[in-house]
Image (cartoon, rainbow, N blue to C red):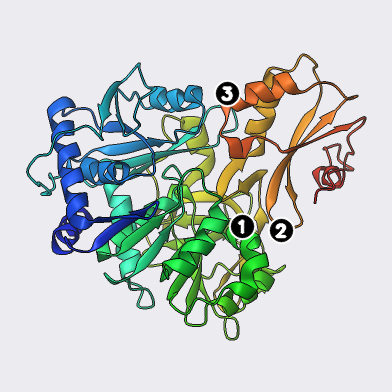
Amino acid sequence: MEFVKKLQESIEKHSNHNVLCISNTFYTYKDFAIEVSKIRAEVARVVDDAEKLIGLVTNDDIQTYASIIALWLEGKAYVPVNPATPLERNSKVFELTETKYVIDSSKTSVYNDYEVISSHTIPETAISLEPKAVSGDDLAYILFTSGTTGLPKGVPITFDNVAGLVDAIEDEPEFNLVPSDRCLQMFELTFDFSVVTYLFPLLAGSCMYTIPKGAIKYFYIFKLIKEQKLTVLTMVPSIINYLRPYFPEINAPDVRYCSFGGGALHSDIAKEWSDCLPNCKIFNYYGPTEFTVYSGFYPYHKETHTKAHNGIIAIGTPQKNTLYLVVDENNQEVPVNVSGELCLAGPQITPGYWKNPKKNAQSFFTREENGKQVRYYKTGDLCFKDSAGDFLYVGRADFQVKIRGYRVELAEIEFHAKAKSDKKVNMVALDITNNLGNAELGLAIESEEFDTQKIFDHMKTQMPDYMIPMHVRFIKEFPHSINGKVNRKELKTYFDIK
């Protein structure tokens, strides 16, 4: 696989450069090569050749990043789990993927039911970075996103999918990382955006700056921009909402590129943020986990490229080899300037949800184009294509929302909230905008007030913290629309949050 070979060459070529800055400690590519080789040797020694899916506990350390590359060199896939997420949910992920082996750099591992490879205690070995031959159909990783039935939903991504992403990004003349770049890596490794924030710096010989697990993210980023003079920022838009009070103090001429994704970028704050970065090119990327992170972008510029709809910056045009199609409810293409569901096709499309034929039938379809069958993924995002060929974002077609950049199914929260309730009452999860413009979760309960401790205790064992509602309102009778559905829009007005 060409991009894995390029990773090997980059690690070898840049051995004296810094690869990672973790909690103010720098590591070189040579340090990284040593860690990769140690973990790789241990995987080769311990893990059966037939075992392709290996669990990875995503700590903020060099061993965790090295584990990803070690597994790829061995032709295996990583299945990441966040150590801060309930053990029960992480075990469910491993159960769904039939994972037997877990790489864990924690001092003490909690994964007693699995064969644990303790990546921080492996003895040193000779550096070995030559990749094994892999098929493009082999899996590179599986990420689990929120699912409607209370079960997390697996998205497998192949080596060919990742190669498609690398090919598309490397084809962009406007974007070109160099070894001297200092790149922000703010994402948890269970979040698909992390793939671009570790992969492209590694391919270029650049240095990544991570955020410690316990840190206040936005404040730490502010510090890194100021003190370490970062040159490349990849962020979710909600971060700059939190940074907004500091904008007058931010003047970052070193920043060359700033990429946004994982949520709507609003035009008013984009302009203010752009003023803080006088020498920066800003890209508003679009792409779901199911399409290997990025599918296209809009090159925002505060004076020349400000195209927006309802105050949300355009998502632009598809990247190399990617097709965009806007369809109606019958999967028929709609005319220019008409809203519909955005569908994606191309080499980056996932083979399909992990062991979920029902969901696959709903989310993918094929149609004939120029005598060929083309397979599309239905994103659930409502968009329209304007007469200039740019795509503009309208909203979600369903009740999926973005919280801190993570995709959350409101139905999953409702499922777990009702599971342990003694009272059979209606509960609706909502996304509410706070005064910073960020989405938070609320739970509306159609009932007289009662103690929700048991419900929340249960939810905390089933879901990561970003999915736990921060606000609860008891409402005697839910408002309904004319066709009898709960009026979610009106329900949000009961949550007056500051």
Q: Neighbour class for label 2 at 10 Å: few (<14), some, many (≥20)?
A: some
Residue in the picture at 86% in, 40% down: 483
Task: Judge by depth and name the residue closer to the eye, 377 or 35.
Answer: 35
Residue 307 can be seen in this image:
no
The residue singled out by tag 2 in the image is: 437
Is residue 287 placed above or below 225 in the rendered structure?
above
Residue 461 shows which numbered tag? 3
Residue contact between numbered discs 1 and 2, judged by CB atoms under 8 Å: yes
The residue singled out by tag 1 in the image is: 238
Q: Is residue 115 left or right of residue 149?
A: left
Q: Position of residue 438 (x, y in %)?
A: 68, 54
Is residue 11 placed above or below 214 in the rendered structure?
below
Q: Position of residue 466 (x, y in %)?
A: 60, 40
Circle 2 sits in a helix, a strand or a loop, which is it? loop
Residue type marked 2: Gly
Gap in Å between the C-alphas at discs 3 and 1?
26 Å
Q: Of the residues under marks 1 and 2, which one precedes in the sequence?
A: 1
Q: Of the residues under marks 3 and 2, which one precedes in the sequence?
A: 2
